[in-house]
Amino acid sequence: MELKQYLTLFRRWGWLLIGGLVLGALSGYIWSLYQRPVYEASTRILVTRAPQNTTSDMTNYLTDQQLTQTYVQLLTTQPVIDAVSLKLGSVIDPLQINVKPVINTQIIQLTFDDNDPQRAATVANTLVEVLIDQNENLQSGRYTTTEASLQAQIKEIQGQIDSLQSQIDNASTQAVQDQLAEVQTQIANLQVEVSGLQQDIQSRTSVVPSATPQPQDQAKISDDKARLSQIQPILNLYQQIYTNLVVLGQPMNSGSTSSGTRLSQLQTTLGLYQQIYVNLLNNLETVQLARLQNTPNVVQIEPAIIPDKPIRPRPLLYTVLASVIGLMLMAAIAFLIEYLDDTLKTPEDIERRLGLSVIGFVTNIEYSVKDKKEVYVLEQPRSPVSEAFRLLRTNLEFSGIDKPLRTILVTSAGPCEGKTTVSVNLAASIAQGGKSVILLDTDLRRPQIHTFFNLPNHAGFSDLFRNGSLSIKMVGHDFGSLKDAVVITSGNPPSNPTELLGSERMNQLLNSLKTAADVVVMDSPPSMVADAQILSAKVDGVILVVYPSHTQVDAALATVEQMKRTGARILGVVLNRIPQNDSYYYTGYHYYHLPYYSTKKAKAKDLEPQLQTPALNKPIIRPQVDLMQVWHRFLNIIIFGVRYRRREKNKMNSQFDWSYRRTVPSGRTQSVWAIRPKAKADTPIGEDEKSRKPL
């Protein structure tokens, strides 16, 4: 799509776009006024894991990112929200919570929206507190069973150790008592023996102190002293043992007694239980250390504070967004309408879809009296509409250079497209050009030509078929003030119009009309009936009238195909009822907007006497300056220049001779009718005229 087409769409639907823009802006602004203010409290949380050097840095980074995402999801889980609701005594809407991680960090951004700023900050901080508690509960639950089992075993072993210790204490006391009794007995025996020995030695030596003892006495004394020397250390040892037993209260190591054996067994069992107890304590410490190492640390690094300004509503932003949405919506509607619209609008559409050129541009005619039809070319000869028909007449003259156009049929693809208006004004324009013209109404179904001249329709063209005594002059009427123009109405509607138009009598009447006038302009029914196809095969040329944005492409294509099958010569297309303010259709005809052709009233000081004419009975005036009019002129000049350059380039590269097109006001619309092969270097002058053929 070209830029020009976009500009055309904008000018056509500008009111809708502006309306959508304004309506959206007003809706957004009014909607923002009725919204309650919303406050946002924000807090930040740091999630860290206990340092572990068993993995690489990249693995730690990925693990930290996954951990952060896990806590982002955990903050919006229902248990956390229910815990916060229970703690605060009010229901928390999950839609009010917004959690997102800070990129490339282990920080989580938590925001909470609420209409009360105090409640927003309270809920945000409470969410963090509940998260920390939930984190502790979740992580400790993984090791609770193991710790409970180890603690139960430790408690049981502790009981066994206490029991054994009690038994050992009891066994030690009994052993001490037994050993004391035994030691006392031994001490008593030894003391008795020592006393006996001492007394015996003393008795033997005290009988005669100065006398020498007998040999047998000396031997006995020696034996007693030797025995005494042996017993005395043993006595001292037993006394030391007695002292130790009394002071220390611990039995001496001895396996000779039953109490000593039991005590040894109890001590051995106690050592085994103590070893088990130590192992259990080590296992418990290992589990607790693993729990601490695998429990992430959640810390609130930035508490939420009470916000002082609401984040919503934002009237300016809402107004801009709503206006943009309204503009886009209206633009979508406009493009949808244009996309679904299957009508012909522009000359480019006609050339692309129908393969025909536009030979005439006729604006929408505004009659002086509403609902009263008239021959506009005669009533307003200096108007842009009259100039359009003169241009159409000139184009038809160039189309008939090789084969003169004696009979011209004006038809359309559908009703109410202005073919009768084009027929009447075209006939008047041809008559003003100095040729004799007969305007013939061949629409025997819904005739309209008699309404333009206020003529009766009692006798006309259809009566020439019924009554052979009638002549053309008898059914003809004056064409207003034109002398060489005749109007023949349709007459009484026949019951079989198709058969009449296709009869031999029709051919005879056409021949008679050709001899009576230079040009016969025939107004036919729309191509939806067979009358137009029958007439198109009998005339020298056919003009197809198209109502922009009204004539459908399929109907126009069907009309062109039907006429091509009948061998009709389609002269071109006339765009009729073009809006006067739409300059798109006036490419090459920008004089429609010039002050020279304006018919608006003005003051006497603005009149230009040199442009006055008796035919108008009023002067041509200069209109007031209009910015849109200036803009349209500027666009038209640019477009005309671009197309002129394109046309000159095509002329240089074409195999045809375009030189005589200089007399044509718009070469683009006449190119299909006024081309001829270029004369070769060895072709005599004038020979190329013989080879000229219309496309």
Image (cartoon, helix red, strand yellow):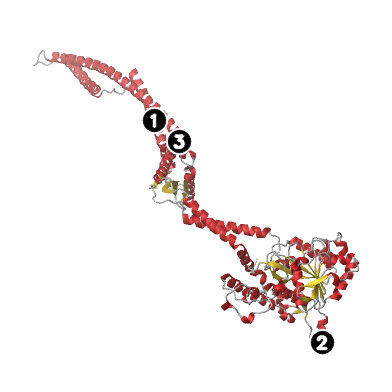
> Could you give the CA–CA distance between mark 3 and mark 2, rounded to whole angstroms?
112 Å
Q: Amino acid at mark 2?
A: Pro
Q: Residue at x 83, y 61 (%)?
A: 493
Q: Quadrant of the C terminus?
A: bottom right
The residue to which callout 3 is attached is 141
Residue 56 visible within the image: no
Q: Which residue is mark 2?
A: 684
Q: Nearer the viewer, residue 294 or 363?
A: 363
- Between 207 and 546, the one lying in front of the other is 546
The single residue placed furthest to the left in the displayed view is 210
**In the image, what residue type sits under mark 1?**
Tyr
Number of the front mark, 3 or 2: 2
In the picture, the quarter occupied by the N terminus is bottom right
Q: Secondary structure at mark 2?
A: loop
**Camera-side residue of 439 and 534:** 439
Q: CA distance from mark 2 to mark 1?
A: 131 Å
Tell me where residue 562 appears, x and y as whole percent.
82, 64
Q: Looking at the image, tell me whether mark 2 or mark 1 is earlier in sequence order.
A: 1
